[in-house]
Image: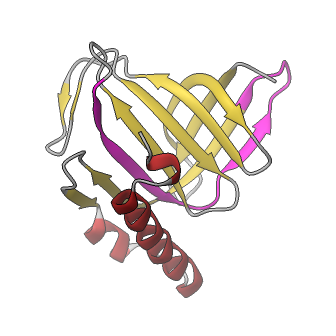
Amino acid sequence: MPDAVVVDKLNLAGEVTVSWSGQVLRRSEHELVLEAIFTHSARDLGYVRLGPGDRFVEHYYTDRWYNIFAIYDAKESLFKGWYCNITRPAEISAEPGGELRVRAVDLALDYFRQPSGREFILDEDEFAALSLDAAEISAARAALAEVRALAAARQGPFAR
């Protein structure tokens, strides 16, 4: 199994908006778990402060309308929170040479939950303005409800 993976986050037009790389932690038929390290300078996003070296454990699914990041502090590995992108089911493919590539189409309805239980729903106005069909909107709303329930129960990929 390849060790490296490249993640491309795409907009609805299929254009890559951000790309990063990580190491594969686990892979199954419908899931890829990877670890990525935040390499930029410190950023305060309002709901979480990211610093150089912070660790993301990311879950991508080929059969679900979301992907999940568990975020850990670089220095003491303290848990900072869960971040979720509402996306179309991810595409996971092997590139020539063995590298994995993940493509996730972002639907701009994102969710963050702090360890204290405080939650933030991001980009909701932008999500409402997107030209998604009724089935896509329904799937994205169902994904958000599923993610919120997982976070509240601290189950599955939300478990520390």
Give left or right: position of 96 versus 37: right
- What is the tally of numbered marks visible in this picture? 0
Name the one closer to the observer, 25 or 12.
Answer: 25
Which residue is rendered at x = 55% and y = 82% of the image? Answer: 133
Above or below 22: residue 9:
below
Residue 83 drawn in magenta? yes
Which residue is depicted at the point 58% across and 49% down?
A: 104
Where 50 sits versus 82, above or below? above
- Residue that protrudes farthest toward the right in the picture: 96
Q: Which of 23 and 40 lies nearest the eye of the viewer?
A: 23
Q: Position of residue 23 (x, y in %)?
A: 61, 21
Whether residue 87 can be seen here: yes
Q: Specify the segment rendered in magenta.
A: 78-100
Q: Nearer the viewer, residue 74 or 66?
A: 74
Q: Seen in the image, is 5 located left or right of residue 128?
A: right
The residue positioned farthest toward the bottom in the image shown: 134
Q: Main secondary structure of the magenta part?
A: strand
- Is residue 90 inside the magenta stretch? yes
